Image (cartoon, helix red, strand yellow):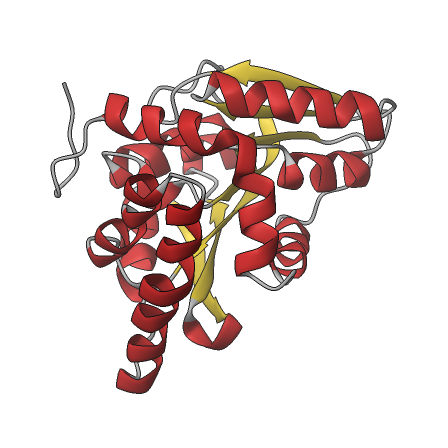
Amino acid sequence: MTTDKIGYSATDIQTIFNRIAPIYDQFNNWLSFGQHRIWKQMTVNWTEPKAGYSGLDICCGSGDLSQLLARRVGKTGTVIGLDFSQELLAIADKRAKQNYPSLPLKWVEGDALNLPFEENTFDCVTMGYGLRNVTDIPRCLQEIHRVLKPKAKMAILDFHRPSQPWQQAFQEWYLDNLVVPLAQYYGLKDEYAYIMPSLERFPIGTEQVTLGQKVGFNPVIHYPIAGGMMGVLVGTKTVSSEQSI
């Protein structure tokens, strides 16, 4: 079974997200002071979605990015939200049917390292707080590149380790004194304590850019946001010489 550098298997991570599913949306809202909505909208905008596009939201969670993307592609487009947590997908489906029944949304349980789609399928791909949790980041980026159409864009939102010492200190204080205690109150301390070790092994922005370039994205840019505590990796699928003929 594949594990990441800190010993978590894919099954371990899947279990974590199944357990936090009931309070996932509340936590995101409280702990970001509502700012996560802005960051997610920025992420969608960077993929440059248009009416009629086919979009994919990987590690879709409760469906925030999927919904934003679906609004942009409209009724003539389609968006698939993919996640390996059945509980989160159930919440995403319920929310969409209750609040946005007309959006072109579909939900698929699947693996970000083995996407169940053909090559050159999607016009845009988003991912929110998922890349940090996969057990093989290069493989995940390779899969995103594979399913994107030539010249199409991806945008990946996640935590980021700031470069300045004071920012790093604040981030650690924020996680230790706000995130984990609040999770402990809901009996989920161990699940949310996972964030810091996952962040410590997560490539910084420049490293993410290099990984994106290696699988064929060009250009690739990493945008630090939220004072460097978050970041968005944006890449365009390169057109090969064979495809451009």
Q: Position of residue 160 (x, y in %)?
A: 37, 63
Which residue occupies the foreground of this view, 37 or 53? 37
Q: Residue at x 35, y 54 (%)?
A: 180
Q: Position of residue 78 (x, y in %)?
A: 73, 24
Q: Position of residue 202 (x, y in %)?
A: 26, 53
Q: Residue at x 56, y 61 (%)?
A: 32
Q: Position of residue 102 (x, y in %)?
A: 88, 23
The answer to whether residue 99 is left or right of residue 145 is: right
Residue 162 visible in the snapshot: yes
Q: Residue at x 64, y 26 (%)?
A: 92
The answer to whether residue 111 is left or right of residue 54 is: left
Q: Quadrant of residue 229?
A: bottom left
* Figure label count: 0
Which residue occupies the foreground of this view, 146 or 107? 107
Q: Residue at x 45, y 13 (%)?
A: 116
Q: Quadrant of residue 34?
A: bottom right
The answer to whether residue 15 is left or right of residue 39 is: left
Q: Is residue 146 above or below residue 164?
A: above
Q: Quadrant of residue 55?
A: top right
Q: Is residue 162 above or below residue 120?
A: below
Which residue occupies the foreground of this view, 19 or 37? 19
Q: Quadrant of the N terminus?
A: top left
The answer to whether residue 165 is left or right of residue 68 is: left
Residue 78 visible in the snapshot: no
Q: Is residue 238 above or below residue 147?
A: below
